[in-house]
Image (cartoon, grey):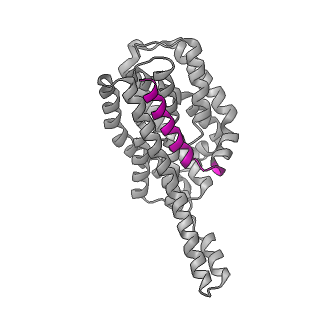
Amino acid sequence: MADEISIIQALILGAVQGVTEWLPISSEGITMFLMINAFGKNPSDAISYAIFLHFGTMLAAILKFKGDFSHILASFAHKKRENSMLSIILIATLFTGLTAAPLYIAIKYGSVAVSGKVFSMLIGALLILTGLILGAPERRERRERSEVKGESGVGESGGSSESSESEAYRRAEELSHFESALLGAAQGCAILPGISRSGTTIAFLLLRKIGQEDALKISFIISVPAILGAVFIDLIGNVQDFNLFTGISMLISSFIFGYATIDVLLRFASIVKFSKFCISLGLIAIIITILTM
């Protein structure tokens, strides 16, 4: 992180991270776009700052879901539910690392040869991809509703559609090992700036018939070891350039804004469809980049 940022910039980035982390719009992509285009940072350093910013919101998530974390860690040896959840977390974390490591190396060191404008257009394109991913559960839900309506229209009783709806969702601990691996791989792909980690993992869980509340919870629980690993690995390669005071400023800002907004923004994210918003945001990012070339 040789390209240093000011304290004011660190506080602004922390605030942006704290707010955008709870929305499925790629906080990493948003903060990197801001650093590259508003603060004049190069893509390689921007990646490192964007990864470190997640440490503050990770602490906010731990504090928010402390009951769930402590319950899993303290009771998994005695109850089947916690054993299942622990295996999901471990398998997802393993496959997150296997997926994210080569992608991290590619974007961290490949970005040295790429201009900030080209990287900004990549962020815009990946935001559009995130929008398409977010729309997948919604498209499937519409298709299933139309099928149910079609079945009830040919004379089937209304009670059967109600029972099928109630049986549609699975509990989070019912995820198979293979599904947990795919969940981890999906999370690993979110190391790419513009791919929303929460959006991708929640969309995957919804497609696997996990309920919205469980999907939100497990998405943020599996984020903790992934973020710890990413921050640790990135700091190892940049420790000589790390400014402690700047890092603390970013950490405090992202934690405060993250914890202050987590409840309202998670509720907001659960009722608002962000698919079109992400696509629009990606298009705006590309247009701004082209106009400022």
Q: Nearer the viewer, residue 72 or 21?
A: 21
Residue 80 in sight in this render: no
Q: Main secondary structure of the magenta part?
A: helix
Instruction: Name which residue lies at 46% across and 51% down.
Output: 87
Using the image, determine if residue 173 lies above or below residue 49: below
Taking the image as shown, residue 154 lies to the left or right of residue 99, namely right
Instruction: Name which residue lies at 41% across and 49% down.
Output: 91
Q: Nearer the viewer, residue 189 or 175?
A: 189
Decide whether residue 288 is among the magenta residues.
yes
Number of marks present in the image shown: 0
- Residue 154 drawn at (x, y percent): 59, 86
Residue 60 in sight in this render: yes
The quarter of the image holding the N terminus is top left
- Residue 76 drawn at (x, y percent): 54, 50
- Residue 169 drawn at (x, y percent): 57, 64
Q: Which segment is the magenta one?
A: 270-293
Q: Quadrant of residue 116?
A: top left
Using the image, determine if residue 116 lies above or below residue 68: above
Decide whether residue 196 is among the magenta residues.
no
The quarter of the image holding the C terminus is top left
Q: Quadrant of residue 249?
A: top right
